[in-house]
Amino acid sequence: MRQSPLVVVANRLPIDDSVAPDGAFEWRRSPGGLVSALHPLLRHTPATWVGWAGGTGPAPHLPAVDGVRMHAVPLSGEDLRDHYEGFANATLWPLYHDAVEQPEYHRRWWEAYQRVNQRFAAAAAEVAEPGGLVWVQDYHLQLVPGLLRDLRPDLRIGFFLHVPFPPPELFMQLPRRAELLRGMLGADLIGFQRAQAAHNFAQLVTKVLELPATDRRIGVGDRVVRIGAFPVSIDTAEMAALATRPEVAERARRLRQDLGDPEHVILSVDRMDYTKGIEQRLKAYRELLASGDVKIPGTVLIQVAVPSRERVGQYQILRERVEHQVGRINGEFGRVGEPAIHYLSQPFDRAELVALYRIADVMAVTPLRDGMNLVAKEYVAARVDDTGALLLSEFAGAAAELEQAYLVNPHDLEGLKQALLAALRATPEDVSARMRAMRAHLHHHDIHAWARSYLRALDHTGSLLSRLATVD
């Protein structure tokens, strides 16, 4: 096994498996948010990505993807059910998103979470070169930093949480709260999306573990663990270049034509998840149609809801509710050949997604809680002509940076309706001024700036970063 100076550890490898026409398996880059964030950083870096390849059974041997070596970690059917669908996504995920859905607690889920985290830590220890840098990602693997430090104390270990970190009164519900905090504290640097999350973590460490802590540093024995906010971003230049490709522009033109060339196109792109505020958004839109403030066919709503965690019961119920709501709205307000909502429950490739961004006069990103939401940033980066209005939830991490968006509380139905109307009725001058300011911010705070900021904080001596081309 070749060892790497940089190892990324995440729940999933940055690939999906599909069957080629000749029956062989192909491995390709997947479109997930984490992959979109990290992929641009690793293309020219001697790195290894440790993660699950999908499916159950023995780990496959995989070729490198864009020069990044892949090291697969096996999961059994029991691991998938109890670790991934159970503790990660039915305990931690709802708890970390304001308990929008009630978290569930089962001892066998916790046992599986421990077991799988141990497996990931052992894999990272195997592929990291002496004195190397390991960057552990997200809530699925919160025990890995501590386990890895026990195995390889020579490593520099970073941990980054892509989702929100809850206030103490919510986190204190967790039966194994102390173990999770100790696991994260195995890292040298813990990164969060927002400063409030770092503050929440410091409060909990003081309360639960009785360790000396500030919002920047925590004393753990003879070590100092640093914490802070490092808001994740996107490859802004890549997104802008894709938006200006002639074939994307032509696809956007045809899409708008297929919609009947409406005066206004509203777009939402979400994973099918109860944190995304899809039901609240649809209810607001229905009331605007009922009041006559929005009329068909002059205004069209496109709702993309990519299937997610379909084996988890809460997600199955949510999909049924959303599809019932869409059907009701189309039945009440649509016409033959002119639906009120174009509902698409399927993934899109990046070019098709950017074509949708290009035709959206209003992009509605209204999650009830979100760590960042890269869709909002992608939309801004794709609006190369400085047009388009971004309607953005106050509870998305992106709201702290994209202050010129039309900010809204998605729990406030009347406020949501009024903000949507304000975005639809805004003058071209106001829309352009807001978009220019947001695009200027993203130009200086792109994915490369995020990587430089985090990795330089993790490797403060600079001894390892000198070898990584992407952060030069």
Image (cartoon, rainbow, N blue to C red):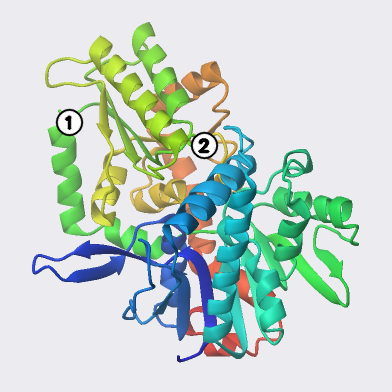
- Is residue 161 among what the camera can see? no
In the depicted structure, whether residue 16 falls above or below residue 287: below
| Left or right: where 334 falls relative to 201 | left
Q: Residue at x 82, y 56 (%)?
A: 205
Q: Residue at x 48, y 36 (%)?
A: 276
Q: Quadrant of the N terminus?
A: bottom left
In the depicted structure, whether residue 406 falls above or below residue 23: above
Q: Residue at x 24, y 13 (%)?
A: 331
| Left or right: where 343 falls relative to 424 | left
Q: Which mark is residue 275?
A: 2
Helix, strand, or loop for circle 1? loop
Circle nearer the N terminus (1, 2): 1
Q: Residue furthest left?
A: 22
In the depicted structure, whether residue 408 falls above or below residue 454: above
User: As rendered, which of 322 and 431 lies closer to the eye?
Assistant: 322
Q: Toward which corner of the image does residue 271 lie, by quadrant?
A: top left
Q: Toward which corner of the image does residue 238 lie, by quadrant?
A: bottom left
Residue 4: percent from the left, percent from the top?
51, 87
Q: Residue furthest top?
A: 291
In front: mark 1 or mark 2? 2
User: As rendered, which of 219 and 318 lies closer to the eye?
Assistant: 318
Q: CA distance from mark 1 to mark 2?
A: 29 Å
Residue 120: percent from the left, percent from the top?
55, 71
Q: Which mark is residue 283?
A: none
User: As rendered, which of 196 and 401 lies closer to the eye?
Assistant: 196
In the depicted structure, whether residue 53 falls above or below residue 88: below
Q: Amino acid at mark 1?
A: Leu
Residue pointed to by mark 1 = 259
Q: Amino acid at mark 2?
A: Thr
